[in-house]
Amino acid sequence: MSGSDERETSKSPEPSPGKAADARVAPGADEDALDLADLDAHGVDGVLARMRRDEDPAPVEPPPRRVRGGRSPLLSLLVTGFGLYLLVTMFPDFRFWLRSNEPQDLGHAGEIAKNGRMPDGLHDAYVRISGTPDVRGAARMTTPSGYIGYFRITEGGGSLFAAVPRSKDEPIRDEFEGTFVGRMKQLDRDAGTGWLEQYLRDENVVRTVDAEPAALWRTLAGARDRIDTVEGAQALSAGERIRLVVHPPDARVQLGVSSFDAKEAERRVAALGQPYVALGKGKAFHSFLVRIPEADRAAAAATLQAGIDVPPNNADPKIGVAVLPGTVAFSGPPEDFELRGDDVTLPREGEQDPVLYEVVGTKLQPRPITQGRTAIPKAWVSAVRVEQPIRLDRSGYLVVVGETPADRRYAGLGWLVVAVLVSLNIASLTAWVRRRAAA
């Protein structure tokens, strides 16, 4: 080959017309592109990308960045809903916790209860209130930690009760102070109200309203649907009963079995010279019914006990003599009573009903039962009582004795914690809604 050919072939090729001037490659650029230093600095992928940049000049959009918004809105919604439920259910304890630890003195229940109903606005108050507990109609509920005694405060009718807690090792009490200090809760908001209402109905717990015998005679001779009582005129409704307290002119005489045998007991009673009837021997005494005027009963007791050694302040019924009133009681629904001359009559319900006696010769004999009805002389009736079933008033109150605002401290603090959590989740939901609206 000629020297000129060799020079021509040794010339570098002309750059392609489509390439930019600053992208011209110097002789030996391919070899330089594979320099080991570039490999060390950029790696194989970096070197290849550098070699292809002229072939793919279009810029590549970076993938959109995910906006980080914290917790899921669904989780915030669930937490908010459950938190609001807790705030509503825990609010009564929170409100009670904010009360003063000095109880509000309501005074006597009889002064604030009107017509057997308590005033409104006392729910969740910390109070001190006085009244008469109805121990006879008391109910007891068993809890895992002890017992709770429920007592009706009589001045409140069926609208005021007291719940008195007692530990299982504390002895049962049958006497209670007339002052109750604790949390006042509306009955329809207490979990035990349904149980208490059922108890009152099953046990036939009643309240008693006194009336004069003459008021009953007027009622029986008139419309029969109302009666005048110490609490004013009362309507006689279904389920109510009228109780007659009867004081016959007879005394109940008891002679102790340790002091007298049967013959000696009857001999001494007969020696009084008054009509009598022997009622039999019991475990502690011989019992008689004797027509003794009230003014003569103390003298009759001394006569019967003459010659018997009786200890001072004797409390043993087997020793000595007791002369007691022969008081008995009859009861029935208002519609069962009728007036017949000088007597008031009602059906005899069974052998458990009391028996009245009349004098026949020198003995006492039971008064006859005519057409299944007992006749009671009106002159013997000393008191009339209207027995009204206790109907629990759910708008009334239950005093939870011993519960103070300080006892609800943890519940109150818990309410505040839940309130903060709900607020934070509501803020999170609000921010999420705003981002969605701005997108």
Image (cartoon, rainbow, N blue to C red):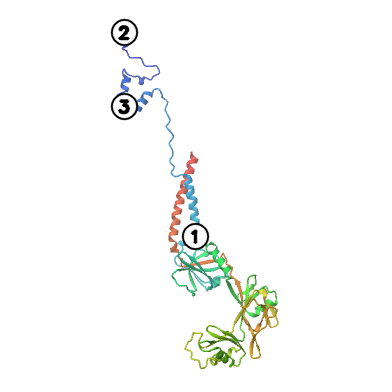
Q: Cβ–Cβ below 8 Å for labels 3 and 1?
A: no
Number of residues whose C-alpha sits closer than 10 Å to that of mark 3, classed few (under 14), some (14–19) or many (20 or more): some
In this rendering, the answer to whether 292 lies above or below 101 is below
N-terminal label among 1 and 2: 2
Q: Is residue 257 left or right of residue 329?
A: left
Image disc number at residue 92: 1
> Regarding mark 1 in the picture, which secondary structure is present there?
helix
Image disc number at residue 5: 2
Image disc number at residue 39: 3
N-terminal label among 3 and 1: 3
Report whether residue 117 is seen. Answer: no
Q: CA distance from mark 1 to mark 2?
A: 108 Å
Query: Quarter of the image holding residue 276?
Result: bottom right
Q: Amino acid at mark 2?
A: Asp
Q: Nearer the viewer, residue 223 or 349?
A: 349
* Residue extending farthest top: 2
Residue in the picture at 40% in, 18% down: 18
N-terminal label among 3 and 2: 2
Q: Amino acid at mark 1?
A: Pro
Q: Cβ–Cβ below 8 Å for labels 3 and 2?
A: no
> Regarding mark 2 in the picture, which secondary structure is present there?
helix
